[in-house]
Amino acid sequence: MKIVVKQKIPIGKNMSRELWLLRHSKAEQNDGIEDFDRALKKRGKQAAERMGAWLQQQQLIPDLVISSPAKRAINTATRVLNAMGVKELTVTEDKRVYAEGFERLKTVLAECPAEAQRVLLVGHNPELEDLLIHLVGVSVLPNSNKLLPTTAFARLEMPDDWTQLSAESAQLLSITHVKSLLQE
């Protein structure tokens, strides 16, 4: 499923940056493994590679990649970048992206360098969904009980200042589910 949404932004809002939210790919269950150390399943690895290939085809190349340090998130980010053929970017691990709430994600984004125009944030639910709802508002989102299933990619147009991430300050451009890419 690919959802494309164009919402009206008040005149005068300066928007030139993009935030890309990527939920980690499908991971093993908790069977005796700490949540933080859960590895990707085979289909999760394949999904991350498919998403990376699709991002490369769409010419959606990030300037900065920030990931949760959890094994499944780092592996997703690495596989996506490898599939994109991106060699010059490294994944910045930030522990605040793991299970600390969407307000902490806003803090992480506020520290992005001014020159970062396209930021890829790889993380987990419910934090990514909560951040998405906060930034674009619930009224423009599709009616779904899970906005960001595993390996889902949301593309948002952001204000010019990473520190100014108030409620409904962004515009949702699209949400792409990896399952829709597997059918192409």
Image (tube, rainbow, N blue to C red):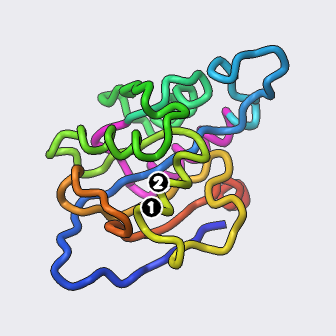
- Point out residue 138 in the picture as x, y percentages from the top left corner: 53, 72
Nearer to me, 53 or 48:
48
> Label 2 is placed on what type of residue?
Leu
Q: Secondary structure at mark 2?
A: helix
**Quadrant position of residue 93:** top left
Answer with left or right where residue 70 lies relative to residue 60: right
Kindly identify the residue that appears in the image at 15 percent across and 45 percent down: 115
Location of residue 122 with respect to 166 vertically, above or below: above
Say which residue label 2 marks. 131
Say which residue label 1 marks. 134
Tell me if label 2 and label 1 are in contact, CB under 8 Å: yes
Answer with left or right where residue 77 lies relative to residue 42: left
Q: What span is colored magenta in the figure? A: 45-65
Does 47 appear in magenta?
yes
Kindly identify the residue that appears in the image at 44 percent across and 60 percent down: 155
Does 150 appear in magenta?
no
Answer with left or right where residue 162 lies relative to residue 29: left
